[in-house]
Image: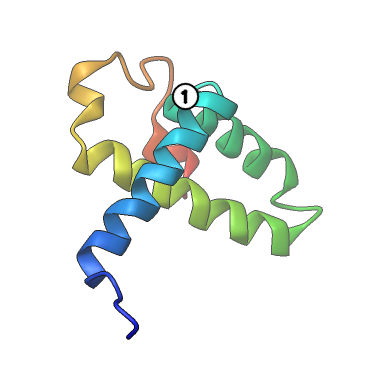
Amino acid sequence: MHTSLPCHICGIKRLKILENAITHYSGGIFSLELRVLDSLHRLKDSCPEVAKTLTEIAHYLHDIIEVGELNEIFSYCSDRSCNDLLK
């Protein structure tokens, strides 16, 4: 008999895996978002397809930061406006 986890548990597991990857392999979510934004800015004219994907990743990371209220815990994007970079 096959037992599957409810969707919300699978979602939580995926988020924990993502959190682990961000924390341990990318220098943290803020660092990762800034690197994505920097790459996006550099590639937006020369590689529009890559820039589109980076925009989606940056929005996703930004949403995680906002929903998790991490921007209130840490000094977040104090040197520039992240929203401006995502445009």
| Rendering quarter of residue 4 | bottom left
| Along the line of sight, the residue nearer the viewer: 59 or 6 | 6
As drawn, is 55 to the left or to the right of 46? left
**Residue occupying image coordinates x 43% and y 45%:** 17
Please, which residue is most extreme toward the right here? Answer: 46
The quadrant of the picture occupied by the N terminus is bottom left
Position of 54 with respect to 65 (left or right) is right
Question: What is the x, y in percent for residue 43?
Answer: 74, 46
On screen, residue 52 above or below 63: below
Coloration mode: rainbow
Q: Is residue 76 left or right of residue 21?
A: left
In the visual, does 39 lie left or right of 4? Answer: right
Q: Which residue is mark 1?
A: 28
Residue 14: % across, % down: 39, 54
Badge 1 density bin: few <14, some 14–19, many ≥20, Cα 10 Å? some
- Element at label 1: loop
- For image coordinates 34% across by 82% down, the residue present is 2
Up-down relation of residue 74 to residue 42 (above or below): above
At x 50%, y 57%, the residue is 56
Total count of labels:
1
Q: Nearer the viewer, residue 61 or 76?
A: 61
> At 69% across and 51% down in the image, what residue appears?
44
Q: Compared to 67, does 25 lie above or below?
A: above
**Residue placed furthest toward the bottom:** 1
Is residue 63 positioned above or below 47 on the image?
Answer: above
- Three-letter residue code for mark 1: Gly
Q: Nearer the viewer, residue 44 or 36?
A: 36
Closer to the camera in the image, 18 or 65: 18
**How far across and how far down the image is residue 65, in percent?**
30, 36
